[in-house]
Amino acid sequence: MRAPLPAPARWWRLLLLAALALTVVGSVALALRLRMPVLLGLPAGALLLLLLAEDYRPVFWMLIAAIPCSIQVELGGGFSMDLVSEPLMLTMLAVFLISLAAGRQFAGSSRLYPFHLLIFLLLFWTLLTTVTSHDPARSAKFLLAKLWYLAAFIWMADRILDRPERVRTLFWAFFIPLVLVSAGITLRHAASGFSFEEANGVAFPLFPNGVIYSATLVLFLPWGWFALRWYTPKSLQWYLILAGLAVLLLGIVFSYKRGAWLAAASLPLVYLLLQRKWLDKLLLAGVLGGALLIGWLVQDNRFYRFAPNYQDVIWHEGDFSAHLEATFQGTEISGMERFYRWVAAKNMIQDMPLFGSGPSTFNQVYKRYADDAFRTYVSDNPEQSTTHNYFLMTFAEQGFPGGLLFLGLCIYMTFKAVRLGYRVRSPERRTVLLGALFSLVTILLHSLLNEMIEVDKVGAMFWLNLLLIHKTEVWDEPRTGTGPHPAE
């Protein structure tokens, strides 16, 4: 028999039933008064949400499978939505709120980890900077999106992914549609002879551009590689994963994206450093070195030494070899345009160090802080791209507290994963940990030159990777009491 619910939970259930009854009466009254029969469907929707609160796992797996296939749709007024992934995330947020109201989401004995604390502090600061934002409407949309991402991929996923074996379902739910989508895009690209000129738009509309497409393929490479350990060599699943990895690699190669190539090429090196137990030391050296480099560039405005020559900075359309050559010479336009945005972000941080301009407002603010010494031919920015560095963007939009909280979360969880990688011995847990760690590394590398964590294809896996690193720590803790271990 189930243990009786505590008194607050019973009261919440009574209130939910009362709310459902009011929904039924109110929708019938409105349907009759406004002559809109469609309103009669509101009670069915409310009842569906209550049923989903009892078993929300099918919706979660649908959401994971929908992410590689979702399409960004413009809603007008500068707002957009990813269909069908974001409506499913919104459904998971509603289910989370109902579960929270019913007293089932957080057990009284649940332990609070630094991981949870950092996320709640980051969410609180996002709320605060939304209130102080230069454009509260845009920032409120960002905050809502952050809420449904966290609800789906942290809070609800925490309950669904209750043991390492569940991660296999997560893997296949994302891997199969991603491979099918990538195969279709590669075939489409083949029709143009894999031309460099077509590479950026061939993935549209499933991916807004080639950068997001290639980053999505790269972030799932580690999951495919380590998932091979789950299955017997030469079994059907093993061959399917191997074939899928070949498709993903082919897509990465013909995306012609330098960031994706660099991130993929870094994975063997990261693995070697992890095996030699040098990774945490080199990561610490990298963080300190990056901080010193930024300090050196800002002091006495040394960054002006890297101001481009307006006439020399060009785009080599259709010529990939010239594109690479210009990259190494410092005359490739997309690379030089980044300096223009970074200098503007630096000036924004100086002017608004505490609260920033507000979440999702960089595009509306940065041009008044830009420096014409770094201007290029594409600085008019018709495509409305942003900072080209997610960390810098967070500092500019949410001030030093928001930037440090996000940076701290990334550094803390990366170091946590590396230390766990030295310690965890269970094959199942180790596979989950390594898949999450290496996938997170590719996302963080891309975040140095792009901002894609708010894109469903990348953002979903970013938060899931963080969660799975945290779950590995929980699964690997010593047993207490007489109950079963959560990993069993």
Image (tube, helix red, strand yellow):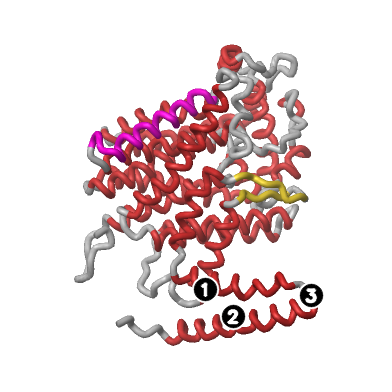
Q: Is residue 289 magenta?
A: no
- Which label was assigned to residue 35? 3
Label 3 neighbourhood size at 10 Å, few (<14), some (14-19), many (20+)? few
Q: Do callouts 3 and 1 mark residues in contact (Cβ within 8 Å)?
A: no
Residue displayed at 33% across by 46% down: 433
Q: Do callouts 3 and 2 mark residues in contact (Cβ within 8 Å)?
A: no
- The location of residue 319, given as percent across then percent down, is 62, 14
Q: Is residue 245 magenta?
A: yes
- Which label was assigned to residue 306? none
Disc 2: which residue:
20
Quarter residue 335 falls in: top right
Disc 1: which residue:
50
Quarter residue 227 falls in: top left
Measured Cα–Cα span from mark 3 to mark 1: 27 Å
Residue 305 in view: no
Q: Secondary structure at mark 2?
A: helix
Residue 150 in view: yes
Residue displayed at 51% across by 37% down: 181
Measured Cα–Cα span from mark 3 to mark 2: 21 Å
Q: Amino acid at mark 1?
A: Leu
- Residue 108, above or below 472: below
Label 1 neighbourhood size at 10 Å, few (<14), some (14-19), many (20+)? some
Q: Secondary structure at mark 3?
A: loop
Residue 121 or residue 218, whichever sits in front: 218
Q: Amino acid at mark 3?
A: Arg
User: In this rendering, which labeled residue sits more in front, label 3 or label 2?
Assistant: 3
SS majority, magenta: helix
Residue displayed at 42% across by 70% down: 106
- The residue segment tinted magenta is 233-255
Which of the two discs, 3 and 2, labels the residue nearer the N terminus? Answer: 2
Q: Amino acid at mark 2?
A: Leu
